[in-house]
Image: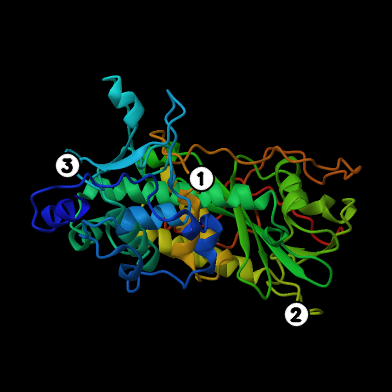
Amino acid sequence: MKWILLLLCCFGFVTTKPRQKFEIVPQQNVEGVDGLLSLESLNSHNLHHHIGQIDDSSTKGMEFLAKYGLIENTRTCGYCPTPMSLVRDTALKSDFYVWRCAGCKKDQSTKKLTVKAGSFFEGLHLSVQQVLYAAADWLENPSKPVLDASRDLKMDKNTIVKLQEWFRQMTKQWFYREGSRDPNMKLGGRNKIVEIDETLMYRAKYNRGKMLTRRQVWVFGMIERGTSKVIMFRVPKRDSATLLPIIHKYVLPGTTIVSDGWRAYGGIGRMQSGYHHLFVNHKTNFVDPTDRSVHTQTIEATWGVLKRKLKSRFGDPEHRLEGHMFNYMFRRFHDNSMLLNHLIYEMKYYRRSESHEDNYDLDLACSHDNDDDEDMDDDEGGSDPDDDDDENDMDDGEGGSDPDDDGDDMGDEE
């Protein structure tokens, strides 16, 4: 009898029910999200080895996400303790697979879940390939106009804009998560120099009508010499109560800090972190003639690069400034290496939001020693008499005297 059935199967007279599948990839092949950082450096040229081409309709993209923990490799039904099976659903426009509970189906209450449920990719009307190729293009061509990206990727312009906004938010997520646990996210240390400075990103242009009522937008930055590590924040004020806690949180004890003569920095040398504070008075010199290492030219050059990048690519991006700053820091901290690997890593933890990108939540919830640092400045900020960035400011301001210049710098007091 067995031989008869076997012969019938061979000639197609008897069909066998396909075996149910309960995992996307064999469980022993799942590496988890940390495995992304052990991969080769991913880019648009080798991505097809892992997920196929951008128009690939196979399961390679889904399998890639499951292998590296960005989506669940197995599912248990939330209504009954039954492992869900992976089935094809031709009604879907991308990925084509869902999790379905066979037990609930028997009760005529079919329970289905998309394979992307609970992930960054859930609800996107895009394939995994489209998202990851868009990420690669954004990282590799930071100055590419949106219309060009839309044409090259064959995707809607508004979709590109939204994807890039999410990618920038991922870099912000990266900074705050890693900044709280990774010592490498701190700047300086013994025998190391950190330059600090503030710059005016936007200001009212003289005699430009409505621009006269535009608020000023200041950014405070810190850069470790000899590395590509830079940290910057948009700040509401430039007083010591705002700037010193940021320094305390992100600059390691024992660091030599070099600044200009802005009065808000007057308490740095008295902080309990043991900083060695040097400053150059820009009213007389841009480099200390007695010690050529005392200058802020590194951070000032960084401002120039950042402003040129923003202006050439985005024109007037005040409402997205914060996202662009974190994107800039993300690239600098990773030294432009393994960027796509790190960005895909962030997709594991990121959940999409429809809120405005730049919600301006400067992280000042940091412990700060009130180490009797009697600040040399109690005012609300005002304009910096040492601000020499006029030629680089986003507004292309004509320069001229600063109407708020009250001359309150440290001079030779310290």
- Judged from the image, the secondary structure of the residue bearing numbered disc 2 is loop
Mark 2 belongs to which amino acid? Arg
Give the residue pinned by disc 2. Answer: 292
Label 2 or label 3, whichever lies nearer to me, is 3
Give the residue pinned by disc 1. Answer: 349
At 34% from the left edge and 49% from the top edge, which residue is drawn?
163
At 42% from the left edge and 41% from the top edge, which residue is drawn?
119
Give the residue pinned by disc 3. Answer: 90
At 44% from the left edge and 24% from the top edge, which residue is drawn?
80
Residue 147's place in the image compared with 83, above or below, is below
Residue at mark 1 to residue at mark 3: CA–CA distance: 29 Å
Residue 143's tag is: none
Sequence-wise first label, 1 or 2: 2
- Judged from the image, the secondary structure of the residue bearing numbered disc 3 is loop
| Residue 87 spot, x, y in % from top left | 27, 42
Q: Quadrant of residue 302?
A: bottom right
| Number of callouts | 3
